[in-house]
Image (spheres, grey):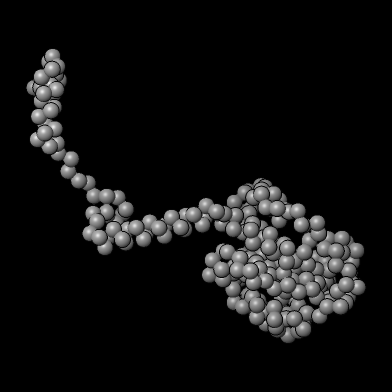
Amino acid sequence: MREIVLDTETTGLDPKSGNRIVEIGCVELLNHVPTGAVYHQYINPERDMPAEAERVHGLSAEFLSGHPVFADIAEAFVEFVGDSPLVIHNAAFDMGFINAELDLIGMTPIDKSRAIDTVTMARRKFPGAQASLDALCRRFGIDLTDRQLHGALLDAQLLASVYLELLGGRQHGMDLAANAAGKEAQAGNAEAGSSIAASGRRAPREHAASSEELARHAEFLGKIKDPIWLRA
């Protein structure tokens, strides 16, 4: 199963107010494991950079002016994500910006139903607790040393680790391995003519005492005064 963990950085909070995407970071997962394939792109927003936004991600208008505009990278981005589910922290925000950018250049928007929102997952798993990416990384012991500023690719990589933990972490993988091993063992026993039932429990077997064991027991009883085993 292929999934894409995605994050964006922007010039502000609302695309309807003229704010634009300035960075996209994506991490490919296969069966919930990072493959090493990533997509990362800085984008020229074709506008100024508000000071409050620059304080968050550290990307200046001057720096971004040397990078391509969204129209020039849109096809490569869409090709990378393909039709895979998108794992996003606060999905409504990033999906809103991505689809606004696609709409500006006449490309088909991405169906919002493809998004897996890790904020929603976190609030269900930990009701009442903080659900920010930083808070979840601290909860799961994920190293935040490199996160001095927000960055789309770094945040996507951190989110991939958080997503695995929200799914069950290492225990999640161990359960899958145990189930697979159990099925293989059952299949092997069935081929060998084992009496293991479909439920995984061994069929009951007889435990009658041997003649030697009965003789030793009778000898033992002869040494005991009024043994209860011989009472009517």
133 is higher (above) or lower (below) than 96: above
Query: What residue is shown at x 64% (from left), y 72% (from top)?
Result: 37
Q: Nearer the viewer, residue 163 or 188?
A: 188
Task: Pick whichever, 33 or 65, lies toward us.
Answer: 33
| As drawn, 23 above or below 218 | below
Residue 96 visible at all:
no
* Number of marks in the rendered image: 0
Q: Is residue 204 left or right of residue 185?
A: left
Where in the figure is residue 182, as x and y percent of width and height?
38, 56
Say which quarter of the image contains residue 215: top left
Question: Along the line of sight, which residue is nearer the eye, 93 or 44?
Answer: 44
Q: Residue furthest top?
A: 225
**Quadrant placement of the C terminus:** top left
The residue sitting at 67% across, 82% down in the picture is 108
Q: Going by the picture, which residue comes out furthest to the bottom?
A: 106
Which percent across, then down, holds residue 53? 85, 64
- Where residue 42 appears, x then y in whole percent? 79, 73
- Quarter-of-image position of residue 12: bottom right
Q: State the image coordinates of residue 43 (x, y, percent, origin top left).
A: 80, 75
| Residue 174 horizontal side relative to residue 29, left or right | left
Q: Is residue 165 above or below residue 230?
A: below
Question: Residue drawn 76% across and 77% down?
Answer: 101
Q: Residue at x 64, y 58 (%)?
A: 161
**Observer able to see residue 172:** yes
Q: Quadrant of residue 216?
A: top left
